[in-house]
Image (spheres, rainbow, N blue to C red):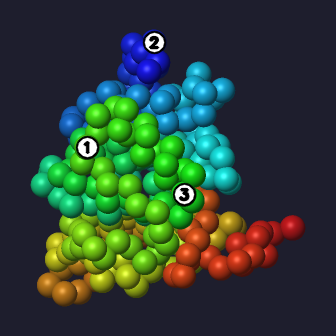
Amino acid sequence: MESKDRYREARNAMVRNQIERRRIRDPRLLSVMRRVPRHLFVPSPLRDHAYEDGPLAIGLGQTISQPYMVAAMTDLLALNGSENVLEIGTGSGYQAAVLAEMARSIHTVEIHPHLSEVARVVLADLGISNVHVHVGDGTLGWPQAAPYQAILVTAAAPEIPDPLIDQLDEDGRLVIPVGGPNGQDLELWRKSSGRIYRETLFPVAFVPLRGRFGWQNNEWEEKIEG
C-alpha cells in the first residue's frame, strides 16, 4: 500500500484551510479527517488532487464528495460513537471510512457492484472492520440492520424515500440532498416522539440518487436546462 506519510501535510492543510475555516469545530471529527487517507479512495491518476477543495470523478458517473461536504454532513449527524449508521451511496468508500471512526457500526449500500467491490477492498486494506458494504437499491435502505440512529445519503433524491424514514430510529437524524440537476438543498430530518421534523440547510450539488424511490430512467437528464 502507498505510504500515508507523503500526504500527511496535505491532509492537515485540507482540514485547516477547507474545514476549520468553514466553522466545523468538532475536535473528534477534525482528528478523523486528518487521519483518513482520502488519496487511497480515488483513482491512482487523481491521487495528487485528493486533498483539493472539490469533488473528483471515480467512474460510472459517480464522484467522491468535496472534503468539506464530507465533514459537514458527518457533523450534522451529531455522532457520539454509539450509533448504528446507514449510508446510502458507498461510492469510493471515503465517507464510510470517516463514519467508521465516528460511530459503532456502518451499513453502506451501493447500487453499482464495481464501486462497491473497490470500496470494500480499500476499507479492508485499511483494517476498517465496522463498515458493512452491501450492493442494492439504496432508496430501500437496508432493513436487515435497522433501526439506525443516523442515516446519510450521498446522492440527490427527488424527495425523501419513505423506507429511510421508516428505518430511522427515535431521536435519529437523517441528512440528505433533495432536488434535481437545476437545484438541490441539503436537508436534516429528525424523528422525535414519533413525529418527523425537516430543516432545509444550504444549497448543494450531488449526482442523482437512482432506485425505486429515486430518479427513474432519464428523468434527471430531461430536467437539465438547455
The image quarter containing residue 197 is bottom left
Q: In the image, what residue occupies the spot 56% across and 68% down?
A: 209
Residue 74 visible, this angle: yes
| x and y, in percent, of residue 171 in the image | 17, 72
Under circle 1, the secondary element is: loop
Mark 1 highlights which residue?
129
Left or right placement of residue 156 versus residue 3 in this view: right
Which quarter shows the N terminus?
top left
- The nearer-to-camera label among 1 and 2 is 1
Asked whether the residues under the numbered discs 1 and 2 touch, taking CB atoms below 8 Å apart as contact, a structural biologist would say: no
Mark 3 highlights which residue?
113
Could you tell me how far apart the alpha carbons at marks 1 and 2 are, in whole angstroms? 25 Å
Q: Residues within 10 Å of mark 2 (few under 14, many from 20)?
A: few
Amino acid type, callout 3:
Pro
Under circle 3, the secondary element is: helix
Q: Earlier in the sequence, mark 3 or mark 2?
A: 2
Asked whether the residues under the numbered discs 1 and 3 touch, taking CB atoms below 8 Å apart as contact, a structural biologist would say: no
- The nearer-to-camera label among 3 and 2 is 3
Give the numbered dot on residue 6. 2
User: What residue occupies the far top of the structure in this picture?
Assistant: 6
Residue 155 visible, this angle: no
Amino acid type, callout 2:
Arg
Q: In the image, what residue occupies the spot 47% across and 68% down?
A: 136
| x and y, in percent, of residue 133 in the image | 38, 55
Under circle 2, the secondary element is: helix
Q: In the image, what residue occupies the spot 17% across and 77% down?
A: 170
Could you tell me how far apart the alpha carbons at marks 1 and 3 are, in whole angstroms? 20 Å
Q: Is residue 65 above or below residue 18?
A: below
| x and y, in percent, of residue 82 in the image | 12, 55
| x and y, in percent, of residue 214 in the image | 56, 77
Amino acid type, callout 1:
Ser
Query: In this view of the protein, which residue sits in the foreground, 10 or 27?
Result: 10
